[in-house]
Image (cartoon, grey):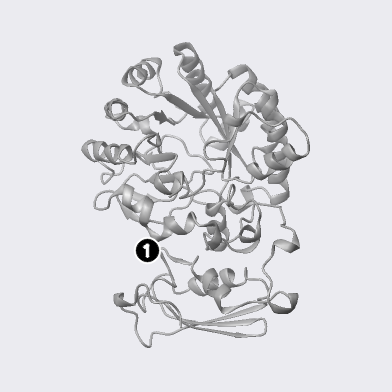
Amino acid sequence: MSAFDRSPFIAIWETTRACALACVHCRAEAMPRRDPDELTTEEGYRLLDRVAAFGSPPPIVVLTGGDPLRRPDLVSLVAYGARQGLSISLTPSGTAAVTRERLCALQAAGLARLAVSLDGATAETHDAFRGVKGSHRHTMRIIEHARALGLPLQINTTVSSLTRADLPELAQQMVEIKPTLWALFFLVPVGRAQAEQGLSAEKIESVLHWAAELAPQVPFGVKTTEAPHYHRVLAERGRGGRRAPAPDLIGRAGRAVTDGNGFVFVDHVGNICPSGFLPLTAGNVRHDDLVAVYREDPLFLSLRDPARLGGRCGACPYRERCGGSRARAYAITGDPLAEDPGCAYRPAEAALPSIAGGSYGPTREQIEKALCGVLDPELGMSVVDLGLVYDIQLVDGSASILMTLTAPGCPIHEVMPDWIRRAVMTVPGVENVDVRITFDPPWTPDRVGVRSR
């Protein structure tokens, strides 16, 4: 069992979805008031206990939202986690709620790091992105308080079509702010975020090379979220003889921390997901064990298995250390194991799978492997493991899939055929996919684990 198979590097708890901002990209689609069903203080304590149960070293814990400062028990939660030996970080919203007094109380409780978002180089661009005038002013004041208190500081910046032009000036501001880490979050179209706000694969590649050039020249770390191909860029530049970034800028185990692979997310009502950007539910902490779900759930297992990756990601020589953004793959294709549409890299032709005679073409095994990446969003299991695939037929480059759904009234009836087509079209040699849905024989729970015949 690898390090990431045993334990996530980061565990994020969305303590609340309440927030005073109206960010245009908000993954959580935050709301003005707290949800009465969000985890209670005692349930929060139990959650932190289970994070500590992953063993030594325990995952880094990030308390996020919404705005976690909307919870009156926040100091108690930080203190409890610190007593369990956890390193607790906090991501408050840029509002007037973050006072010096509250930061002092959180620091005294054991807060290890404060992370704030700065998405524009000017008040106008930042406030426009965050949806509330004055957010930039509050954010800069929070930064000043953290520096005065000696509280380790991380700056998060969303990289999108709305913020890309500000990155060079923001980099200069980082030199003045002196954060421990500058984290670049590459937009995934989930929640309020729209696909047109994201960058093309070529523009993402350009930003990653810019970040790799910047990293060894600045006194703070530079990392990426939902752009794990930064590791491939760093490796390529290293081989080119250029000065490589300091090793602590990449993370643990020589590879990226990605959705479900070194990363686990618990939402405000306890749902366990691979990440906040990949909101597929694999359990709930109110009745499922967090450790067991992360280590044993089929969704998490598939996300940690590079052999399950489709398309260019599956053929990529960097798939072990990168793996692509599973969240972006899911958001755009409906398949969390499809190739990352945000990566411009094309593996050498020799790395692609071949069939007898040296030509490329589909096999039944390749089709079934691709279908293993199509998950029922409610049960969190693949359509193959659920026994929903009744038959696979191949004629030249055409694939015909006969399948069922868990119920005739299933709400994904309209979208499942498209998910199936997208997954199967990632198989080399497939030119056409026909999907037929039947309810004869009807699906029953005893079909779980039955492979297609």
Residue at 66%, 47% in the rendered image: 199
Residue at 67%, 29% in the rendered image: 215
Asked whether the viewer can see residue 163, the reply is yes
Residue 43, compared with residue 412, is above or below; it is: above
Measuring from the top left, give residue 177's x and y in whole percent. 58, 19
In the displayed structure, does residue 386 sit left or right of residue 352? left
Measuring from the top left, give residue 20's x and y in whole percent. 42, 34
Residue 132, compared with residue 427, is above or below; it is: above
Asked whether the viewer can see residue 29, the reply is no
In the displayed structure, does residue 438 sit left or right of residue 319? left
State the residue position of label 1.
378
Query: How crowded is the residue under tag 1: few (<14 C-alpha within 10 Å), some, or many (20+)?
Result: few
Q: Residue furthest left?
A: 42
Q: Quadrant of residue 47?
A: top left
Residue 324, compared with residue 113, is above or below; it is: below
- In the image shown, does 140 or 254 lie closer to the viewer? 254
Q: Residue furthest top?
A: 148
Measuring from the top left, give residue 71's x and y in whole percent. 31, 32
Residue at 65%, 60% in the rendered image: 315
- In the image shown, does 162 or 427 lie closer to the viewer? 427
